[in-house]
C-alpha cells in the first residue's frame, strides 16, 4: 500500500516533469514545475525527511516557482510567441539525454545497490536506537549536522549565507534598469 | 515494513535528471532552460536523501548537502532570472539562441 | 735616439688628438702644431739614422716591443724595428711629410676646414710611421689600414664634390679587396708560426725551409697573399683603378699620400717581408710580372691623358710598377732606392702641378701653356723633376731606374728578357709623356688667356719646398754613385751588399736605354714644342688605339659593370629573397598559418550556449561509458 | 650651466659608486656589488614613478652613472690570474627545486657588465630629447636594463631565464609605444620571435635539469656534469635546439627578420640597448650555457651550424647593400656582425672564442653608437629615406665625423674595437690543410674574410649618400644643425670606449681569455 504511494508519486513526478519540458505555454510549464516539486517533496516525506519536505515545498514551490512566474511575466511577450518552443537540436538533445539515461541505467544496474543486505544497511537497522535518541527529531539533528564544528560544515554553512546575500544583491544589480 | 528498493529511487532520480537535461538542451526559452536545471537539481536531491536514508547509518552528510543544494538553487534561480531579464531588456528576447555574441 | 724612436709615430698622433679635441677653431695654431710635430719627427729620424749608421753593419737591427694583446700561445706586439730599410723609409716619409705640410699652409690657406686638413695629415703621418717602424705583421697591417683611412678621408676632403665622394669610396673599397688577401696572409702566418714577429718568422721560415717542414710553395702562397695587399695599396694591375681617381683630393695630399709615401707602402711591405717572397721563384715571378706589366700598362695610358694630375698619377703607377718589378727580379736595393728617389721627384712633380693649379684653378693641360713666363720657380723645379723621372744623368732617376733595369737584366726570373725590354720601353714612354706634359704646360703660347692673366707664382711657403725637393731630385741619386754605392751598402737584403757597378760598366750597359729616353724626349719635343708633327692628326689616324688609351683600357667601365650589375644584382636577389621568402614567406607565413588554424578552430565556438551544453553532456556520457564499460 | 649640471650628475655618482665598493679581499663590502648592479635600475624605476616628471631624466642619468661606476669597479676587481667566477653571491631560494639566487662574474660577464653600463649610460643621454610620456619611458627603460643586468650576471639558469624575459617585455612596450613607422607590427614580431627563441631555451634548460638527476640550474654544476651526466645522444639532440633558441636572440639566419623591423621602428635608445646588449645575449648564452654543458654536442654540430652563421655574415651584408632606409642598413649590419660573433663561436678555437667575446663587446658599443647617430640625424633631418638624404656633412660636421668613425668601427678598422674582434675571429677560423685532412673552415675562412670588403662597401655607400655630395633636399638643409652637447656626449663616450678597446685590447682580451681558455680545454676544441 505504502509502496504504491511511492509509485504513484513517481508517476506524477515524471509526468509533470515531462510537461515542464514539452508544454508550449511557459506559464503552464511553471505550474507543472510546481507540481513536480510537490511530488518530490512527497518522496521526501515518504523517505521520512519531514523537515526537508517542508523546506522543499517552501523554497521550490513557494519561492522558486513564484520567482519563475515573475520572470515569465516580466518577459511576457514570449508567452504569445507562436514560434517553436524547441531549438534546432531537439533530436541531438534526445540523443544526448538518451545516452546519459543509458549510462545511468547501466551504472545503477551494475552496482550492488540492489542488494538490500548491504553491511552498512544491516548495521544501521540493528542499532538505530542510540542514534535516534541522540537526534531526537530531524530538525535538531540536521542543525547539529550543519553547525557542529567537528562535522566540518559550519564554515560552508556560513559561507552559503554570504553567497545568498551576494546573490540577492547581485540579482538586484543585474536586473536593475540602467539609469541611462 | 517492506521498503521500496533504493534502486527505484535511483531510477526515478535518473529519469528526472534526464528529463531535465532534455529541457536544458532543447528548449529555446531561457526560463525553460532554468526550469530544466531545477529538475536536475531535484533529481540529485532525491538521490542524496535516498542514500542517506538507506545507507547513511545516521550520517547526516546527505541531508546537509541537500540543504546546500536547495539553498544554492534558490540563489541561482534569482541570479539567473535577473540575467534573463537583463538580456531580455537588451535583446528584446528571452531566447537563448539570440544571445550568441561569443561566436568565434 | 733609437730608444725614443716610438715617439716618431707618437708625436703626429698626439698632434692629431690635440687638433681634433682642442684647437679646431684656431687655424694657424693647428697647422703650427702639426708642422712642429712633423719637424720633430724629421729631426728624430735624422738622429735615428745617424745612430744607426754609426753601428756596425751587422748589428744594424734594433727592435723592442710591448704586448698589445695576448691569448696564449699567441702574443701580438706593438713594437719598433729600426734597421737600415726602416731608417731609409723614415727619412723619406718624415721629410716629404714635413715639406708637404709646409706647402699645404700656402695651398690650403683659404679652406674653411684648414685645421681638419692638418689633423688628417698628422693622422696620416702617424699611421704611415707606425707602419714603417712596425716590427711585426699585425702592426704593419694596422698601420696599413690606418693609412687607408687617411687616404679615404683626404681624397674625400672636399666631400661635397660628387667626384671626390665617389673617388674616396672607390679607393677604400679597392684597397680593402687587396687587404683581404693581406689579412689572410697575416692570419696564416699567425696560425702557422704562432708569432707575428718579423724576426721570428724569418727564423722559423729559414729553419723550416732548410729542414723541409714547410714547402717553398706554401711560403710562396703566404707571400702572394701578402702581395695582394701590396697590389691594392701600391695600385698595381688589376687593382690600379683607384689611384687616378684619388686625384680628386687636394694636390698636396696627392703628392704626399698618392705619390711619395702611402702608395710606396706596398713596395716597402714586400721589401720588409722579403724572406717570404724570396723563398720560392713562383712568388718572385708573379711579383716581377705584375710590376713589369703595370709599369708598361700605366705608361701607355699616361700618353693619352689630359688632366695634369692624372698624367702624374699614371706615371706614379708606372714607377711603382718599376719598384715592384725590381723587387720581384731580386733587385732589393734598386727597388728601395727607386722608392727613395721617386718620393723626391714625384712629390716635386705633384707639388709643382699644385702650384700650377693654385695659380690657374684648372687642371686641364690644354688650357695651360707658356706658364714659364709667369711661374719661373715652378717651371725650373718642374723641369728638374721631369729630367729626373725621365732618367737623364745626373738626376736621381737615372741612377735608380738604371739599377732596376740592371737587376732585371741579371735576374733569374722566367722571362726576364721580356721584362727588361718592357722596362726599357716604359722608360721611353715615360720620357715621352713627361716631356709632353712639360712642353704643353710650361712652354709655347698661353691657350687660355683669361686664366693666364690671373696666373701668378705661388708664395714662398709653397715654392720653398719645391726648391728643396728639386735639390734632392738632383742629388739623391748620387748616394748610390756607381762604384761607390753608399746607399747599397746601407740598405740591402741578406748580409752581403749588392755590388755597385762602376760608372764605366753602368754607362756601357745603359746607353741603349739612355738613347731611347733621349729619343722619347726628342719625339715629344717634335710633337709639342717644335710642332713638327701634329698630335691631333696622329690621334685621328690611330683613333681606336687612342680611344683605348684615353679610356684607360675601359677598366673603370668594366669594374663599374661588375659592381653595378653583378654585385648589386646579387644584392637585389638577396634582398628580394629576404623580403619575400624569409620575411613575408617564412616569418609572416608562420603567423598566417597560426591565424588560419585559429580561424578553423574558432568555428567550433558557435556562441550558442546549448551547443556547448550538449557537448558537455554527450561527452559525459561517452566518457562514463568508456571508463566504466 | 647646463653642461656643468650634466657633467656633475655624471661624475659624482660615478666616482661615488666606484669608491664605495672595494675588493672582497680587503673585507666584505657593505652592499653586495652585483646585486646592487641588478637592483639599482629597478629601484630607479620605482623612484621615477614616485617622483615628479621634471626629475625623471636626472634620476635616470644619476642611476646610469652609478651603474657605470659599479661596472668599472667590477672591471677592476676581477682577477684574471685567478679566473673562474668571482664576486659570487648566493642565496637559497627554492631549495626543493634546486633554484638559487646565484650571481657572479667571470671574465666574459665582466666585459658584458661593462657593456651594459656603457650602453645604459649612453642610451639615457640619447633619450634626453624624449618628450612623450617621459616617466613611463624611463621606467620601462630602467626595468629593461635591470633585466639584462641580471641576465648577464646570473649563474643560475632559472634566474637567467627570468631576467631575460624581464627584459623582453619592456622592450615590447618601448617599441610599441615610442616607436615609429609600423611600430605595433614590429613590436609584436620582435617579441614573438624572441619569445619563441626563449621557448626553445626554456625547454633545453628543463631537459638538462631533469636529465642531470642532480636537479640544479647552477651552470657550474651543469658544466661539470657534461661528461658524465649527459650522454652523446642527449647532447646531439639538445645542442642544436639550444643553439637555435639562443640564435634567435642573436638574429641567426633565418630567424633574423625581427631585427631590421624591430630596430627600424624602435626609438633610438631602445635600438641601442637592444642591438648593443640584448642581442648579444644570444652569443653570450651559447658560450655560457650551451658549450660548457653540451660540449660533445657542440663538437658534433658546430661544423654544420657554422653555415648558418656564414650566411648571416655575407647575406645580411648583401641585403644591407640594397636597403632604402638609413636605419635598416644599420640593422642589417648588426645582423651581419652578430653572425660574425656566432661564427667565432663555431670555430671552437681559442682565438675564435675570444674574438666572439670581444666582438660582442665591440658590436654592442659600436652598434649603440651607430644607432645613436642615426637617431640624432633623424631627429634633425626628419627623414631616414636614403633617397632624400644627402650632403649633410656640411650642416653637421661633427655628427658627420662621428658617423665616419662609427662606420670605420663597423668596417673593422684597426684602432677601433671592431678590428680586434674580427681579427681574432678570423684568426680562429683559419685551418690549414697543411697537416692533412679537410675542414670546412678551409673554405669558410676566405669566405668570411670577404665580409670586410662587403661591410666597407655598404658603410661607405651610406656615408657617401647621407653626408657627402651636394645637398639633395633643400628643406633638410634649412633645418639641419649640428649635434648639441647632450647629443654628442653619449656618442663621443661610446667612441672613446671603442677606441680604448681598439688601441689597447690587452686588458679586455685577458678578461675574455680568462673565461675562454678553460672553456676550450673543457670542450676539447682547438688550441
Image (cartoon, helix red, strand yellow):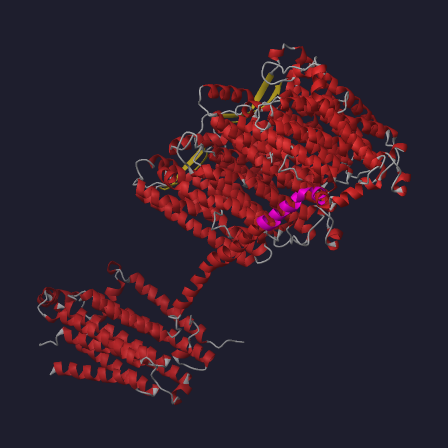
Lateral position of residue A87 relative to residue A119, left or right = right
- Residue D417 location in percent, x, y? 58, 35
Q: Is residue D201 left or right of residue D362?
A: left
Q: Residue at 14% across / 68% down in the picture?
A: A111
Q: Position of residue D82 (x, y in %)?
A: 45, 26
Q: Nearer the viewer, residue D280 or C384?
A: C384
Decide: is A49 above or below C113. below
- Residue A57 in view here: no
Would residue A173 be seen by someone viewing this image from the given angle?
A: yes
Whether residue C550 appears in magenta in the rendering, the answer is yes
Q: Of residues C270 and A127, which is closer to you in this image?
A: C270
Residue positioned 12% across, 75% down in the render? B5
Which percent across, then down, holds residue C64?
Answer: 59, 18
Using residue C345 as the reference point, say whether residue C136 is left or right of it: left
Extent of the magenta region = C547-567
- Residue C386 image-quadrant placement: top right
Is the magenta region chiefly helix, strand or loop? helix
Query: In which quadrant is the C terminus of chain C drawn?
Result: bottom left
Q: Is residue C499 left or right of residue D363?
A: right
- Whether D199 is drawn above or below B6: the answer is above
Please state which of residues C541 and C452 is positioned toward the viewer in this rendering.
C541
Q: Quadrant of the N terminus of chain C?
A: top right
Amino acid at each position: 500500500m505504502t509502496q504504491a504511494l511511492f509509485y504513484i508519486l513517481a508517476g506524477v513526478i515524471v509526468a509533470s516533469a515531462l510537461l515542464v519540458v514539452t508544454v508550449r505555454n511557459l506559464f503552464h510549464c511553471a505550474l507543472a514545475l510546481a507540481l513536480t516539486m510537490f511530488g518530490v517533496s512527497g518522496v521526501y516525506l515518504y523517505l521520512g525527511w519531514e523537515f526537508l519536505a517542508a523546506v522543499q515545498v517552501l523554497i521550490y514551490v513557494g519561492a522558486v516557482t513564484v520567482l519563475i512566474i515573475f520572470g515569465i511575466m516580466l518577459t511576457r511577450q514570449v508567452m504569445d510567441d507562436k514560434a517553436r518552443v524547441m531549438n534546432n537540436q531537439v533530436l541531438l538533445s534526445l540523443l544526448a539525454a538518451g545516452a546519459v539515461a543509458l549510462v545511468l541505467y547501466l551504472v545503477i544496474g551494475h552496482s550492488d545497490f540492489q542488494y538490500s543486505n548491504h553491511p552498512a544497511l544491516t548495521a544501521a537497522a540493528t542499532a538505530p536506537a542510540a542514534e535516534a535518541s541522540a537526534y531526537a527529531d530531524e530538525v535538531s539533528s540536521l542543525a547539529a549536522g550543519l553547525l557542529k564544528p567537528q562535522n566540518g560544515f559550519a564554515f560552508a554553512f556560513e559561507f552559503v549565507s554570504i553567497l545568498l546575500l551576494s546573490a540577492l544583491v547581485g540579482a538586484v544589480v543585474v536586473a536593475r534598469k540602467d539609469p541611462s | 515494513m517492506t521498503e521500496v528498493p533504493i534502486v527505484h529511487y535511483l531510477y526515478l532520480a535518473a529519469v528526472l535528471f534526464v528529463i531535465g537535461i532534455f529541457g536544458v538542451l532543447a528548449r529555446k526559452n531561457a526560463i525553460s532552460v532554468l526550469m530544466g536545471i531545477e529538475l536536475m537539481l531535484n533529481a540529485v536531491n532525491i538521490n542524496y536523501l535516498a542514500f542517506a536514508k538507506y545507507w547513511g547509518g545516521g550520517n547526516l552528510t546527505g541531508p546537509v548537502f541537500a540543504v546546500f543544494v536547495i539553498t544554492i538553487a534558490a540563489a541561482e534561480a534569482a541570479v539567473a532570472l535577473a540575467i534573463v531579464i537583463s538580456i531580455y531588456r537588451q535583446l528584446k528576447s528571452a531566447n537563448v539562441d539570440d544571445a550568441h555574441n561569443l561566436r568565434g | 735616439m733609437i730608444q725614443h724612436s716610438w715617439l716618431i709615430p707618437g708625436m703626429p698622433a698626439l698632434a692629431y688628438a690635440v687638433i681634433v679635441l682642442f684647437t679646431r677653431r684656431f687655424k694657424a695654431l693647428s697647422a703650427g702644431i702639426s708642422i712642429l710635430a712633423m719637424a720633430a719627427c724629421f729631426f728624430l729620424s735624422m738622429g735615428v739614422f745617424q745612430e744607426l749608421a754609426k753601428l756596425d753593419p751587422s748589428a744594424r737591427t734594433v727592435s723592442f716591443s710591448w704586448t698589445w694583446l695576448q691569448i696564449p700561445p699567441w702574443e701580438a706586439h706593438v713594437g719598433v724595428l729600426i734597421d737600415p730599410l726602416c731608417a731609409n723609409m723614415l727619412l723619406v716619409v718624415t721629410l716629404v711629410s714635413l715639406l708637404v705640410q709646409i706647402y699645404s699652409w700656402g695651398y690650403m690657406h683659404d679652406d674653411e676646414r684648414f685645421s681638419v686638413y692638418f689633423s688628417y695629415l698628422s693622422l696620416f703621418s702617424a699611421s704611415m710611421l707606425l707602419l714603417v717602424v712596425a716590427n711585426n705583421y699585425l702592426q704593419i697591417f694596422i698601420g696599413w689600414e690606418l693609412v687607408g683611412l687617411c687616404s679615404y678621408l683626404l681624397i674625400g676632403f672636399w666631400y661635397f664634390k660628387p667626384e671626390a665622394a665617389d673617388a674616396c669610396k672607390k679607393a677604400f673599397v679597392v684597397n680593402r679587396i687587396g687587404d683581404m688577401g693581406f689579412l689572410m696572409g697575416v692570419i696564416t702566418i699567425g696560425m702557422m708560426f704562432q708569432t707575428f714577429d718579423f724576426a721570428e718568422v724569418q727564423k722559423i721560415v729559414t729553419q723550416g725551409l732548410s729542414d723541409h717542414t714547410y714547402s717553398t710553395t706554401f711560403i710562396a702562397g703566404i707571400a702572394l697573399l701578402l702581395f695582394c695587399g701590396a697590389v691594392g695599396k701600391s695600385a698595381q694591375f688589376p687593382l690600379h683603378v683607384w689611384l687616378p681617381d684619388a686625384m680628386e683630393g687636394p694636390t698636396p695630399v696627392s703628392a704626399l699620400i698618392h705619390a711619395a709615401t702611402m702608395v710606396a707602402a706596398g713596395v716597402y711591405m714586400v721589401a720588409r717581408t722579403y724572406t717570404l717572397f724570396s723563398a720560392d721563384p713562383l712568388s718572385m715571378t708573379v711579383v716581377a710580372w705584375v710590376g713589369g706589366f703595370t709599369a708598361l700598362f700605366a705608361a701607355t695610358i699616361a700618353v693619352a691623358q689630359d688632366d695634369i694630375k692624372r698624367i702624374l698619377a699614371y706615371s706614379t703607377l708606372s714607377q711603382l710598377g718599376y719598384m715592384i718589378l725590381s723587387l720581384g727580379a731580386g733587385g732589393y736595393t734598386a727597388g728601395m732606392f727607386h722608392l727613395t728617389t721617386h718620393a723626391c721627384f714625384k712629390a716635386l712633380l705633384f707639388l709643382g702641378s699644385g702650384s700650377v693649379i693654385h695659380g690657374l684653378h684648372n687642371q686641364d693641360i690644354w688650357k695651360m701653356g707658356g706658364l714659364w713666363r709667369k711661374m719661373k720657380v715652378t717651371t725650373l723645379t718642374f723641369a728638374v723633376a721631369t729630367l729626373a723621372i725621365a732618367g737623364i744623368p745626373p738626376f736621381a732617376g737615372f741612377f735608380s731606374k738604371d739599377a732596376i733595369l740592371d737587376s732585371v737584366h741579371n735576374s733569374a726570373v722566367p722571362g726576364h728578357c721580356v721584362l727588361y725590354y718592357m722596362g726599357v720601353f716604359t722608360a721611353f714612354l715615360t720620357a715621352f709623356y713627361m716631356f709632353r706634359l712639360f712642353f704643353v704646360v710650361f712652354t709655347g703660347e698661353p691657350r687660355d688667356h683669361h686664366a693666364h692673366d690671373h696666373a701668378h707664382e705661388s708664395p714662398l711657403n709653397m715654392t720653398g719646398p719645391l726648391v728643396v725637393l728639386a735639390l734632392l731630385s738632383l742629388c739623391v741619386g748620387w748616394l748610390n754613385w756607381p762604384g761607390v754605392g753608399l746607399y747599397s751598402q746601407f740598405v740591402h737584403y741578406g748580409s752581403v751588399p749588392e755590388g755597385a757597378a762602376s760608372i764605366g760598366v753602368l754607362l756601357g750597359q745603359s746607353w741603349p736605354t739612355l738613347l731611347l729616353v733621349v729619343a722619347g724626349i726628342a719625339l715629344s719635343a717634335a710633337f709639342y714644342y717644335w710642332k713638327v708633327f701634329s698630335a691631333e692628326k696622329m690621334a685621328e689616324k690611330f683613333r681606336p688605339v687612342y680611344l683605348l688609351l684615353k679610356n684607360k683600357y675601359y677598366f673603370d667601365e668594366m669594374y663599374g659593370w661588375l659592381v653595378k650589375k653583378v654585385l648589386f644584382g646579387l644584392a637585389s636577389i638577396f634582398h628580394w629573397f629576404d623580403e619575400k621568402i624569409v620575411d613575408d614567406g617564412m616569418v609572416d607565413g608562420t603567423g598566417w598559418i597560426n591565424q588560419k588554424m585559429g580561424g578553423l578552430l574558432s568555428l567550433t565556438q558557435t556562441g550558442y550556449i546549448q551547443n556547448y551544453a550538449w557537448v558537455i553532456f554527450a561527452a559525459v556520457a561517452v566518457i562514463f561509458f568508456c571508463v566504466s564499460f | 650651466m647646463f653642461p656643468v649640471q650634466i657633467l656633475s650628475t655624471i661624475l659624482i655618482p660615478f666616482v661615488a659608486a666606484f669608491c664605495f665598493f672595494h675588493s672582497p679581499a680587503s673585507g666584505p663590502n657593505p652592499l653586495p656589488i652585483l646585486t646592487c648592479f641588478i637592483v639599482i635600475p629597478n629601484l630607479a624605476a620605482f623612484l621615477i614613478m614616485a617622483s615628479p616628471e621634471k626629475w625623471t631624466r636626472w634620476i635616470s642619468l644619476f642611476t646610469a652613472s652609478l651603474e657605470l661606476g659599479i661596472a668599472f669597479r667590477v672591471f677592476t676587481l676581477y682577477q684574471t690570474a685567478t679566473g673562474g667566477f668571482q664576486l659570487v653571491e648566493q642565496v637559497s631560494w627554492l631549495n626543493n627545486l634546486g633554484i638559487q639566487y646565484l650571481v657572479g662574474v667571470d671574465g666574459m660577464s665582466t666585459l658584458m657588465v661593462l657593456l651594459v653600463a656603457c650602453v645604459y649610460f649612453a642610451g639615457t643621454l640619447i633619450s634626453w630629447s624624449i618628450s612623450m610620456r617621459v616617466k613611463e619611458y624611463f621606467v620601462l627603460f630602467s626595468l629593461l636594463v635591470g633585466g639584462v643586468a641580471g641576465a648577464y650576471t646570473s649563474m643560475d639558469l632559472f634566474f637567467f631565464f627570468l631576467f631575460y624575459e624581464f627584459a623582453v617585455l619592456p622592450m615590447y612596450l618601448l617599441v610599441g609605444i615610442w616607436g615609429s613607422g609600423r611600430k605595433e607590427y614590429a613590436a609584436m614580431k620582435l617579441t614573438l620571435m624572441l619569445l619563441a627563441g626563449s621557448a626553445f631555451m626554456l625547454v633545453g634548460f628543463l631537459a638538462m635539469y631533469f636529465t642531470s638527476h642532480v636537479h640544479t640550474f647552477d651552470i657550474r654544476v651543469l658544466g661539470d656534469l657534461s661528461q658524465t651526466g649527459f650522454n652523446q645522444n642527449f647532447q646531439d639532440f639538445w645542442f642544436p635546439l639550444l643553439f637555435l633558441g639562443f640564435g634567435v636572440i642573436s638574429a641567426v639566419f633565418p630567424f633574423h627578420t625581427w631585427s631590421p623591423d624591430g630596430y627600424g621602428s624602435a626609438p633610438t635608445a631602445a635600438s641601442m640597448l637592444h642591438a648593443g646588449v640584448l642581442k648579444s645575449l644570444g652569443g653570450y648564452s651559447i658560450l655560457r650555457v650551451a658549450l660548457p654543458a653540451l660540449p660533445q654536442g657542440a663538437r658534433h654540430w658546430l661544423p654544420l651550424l657554422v653555415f648558418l652563421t656564414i650566411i648571416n655574415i655575407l647575406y645580411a651584408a648583401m641585403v644591407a647593400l640594397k636597403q632604402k632606409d638609413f636605419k635598416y642598413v644599420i640593422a642589417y649590419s648588426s645582423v651581419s656582425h652578430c653572425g660574425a660573433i656566432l661564427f667565432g663561436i663555431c670555430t671552437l678555437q681559442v682565438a675564435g672564442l675570444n674574438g666572439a667575446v670581444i666582438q660582442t663587446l665591440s658590436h654592442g658599443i659600436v652598434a649603440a653608437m651607430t644607432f645613436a647617430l642615426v637617431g640624432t640625424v633623424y631627429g634633425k633631418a626628419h627623414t631616414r629615406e636614403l633617397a632624400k638624404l644627402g650632403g649633410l656633412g656640411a650642416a653637421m660636421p661633427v655628427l658627420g665625423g662621428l658617423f665616419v668613425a662609427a662606420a670605420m668601427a663597423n668596417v673593422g678598422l684597426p684602432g677601433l674595437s671592431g678590428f680586434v674582434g674580427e681579427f681574432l675571429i678570423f684568426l680562429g677560423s683559419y685551418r690549414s690543410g697543411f697537416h692533412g685532412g679537410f675542414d670546412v673552415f678551409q673554405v669558410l675562412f676566405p669566405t668570411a674574410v670577404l665580409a670586410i670588403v662587403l661591410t666597407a662597401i655598404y658603410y661607405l655607400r651610406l656615408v657617401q649618400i647621407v653626408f657627402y655630395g651636394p645637398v639633395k633636399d633643400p628643406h633638410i638643409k634649412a633645418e639641419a644643425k649640428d649635434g648639441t652637447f647632450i647629443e654628442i656626449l653619449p656618442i663621443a663616450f661610446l667612441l672613446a670606449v671603442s677606441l680604448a678597446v681598439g688601441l689597447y685590447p690587452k686588458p679586455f682580451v685577458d678578461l675574455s681569455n680568462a673565461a675562454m681558455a678553460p672553456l676550450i680545454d673543457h670542450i676539447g676544441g682547438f688550441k
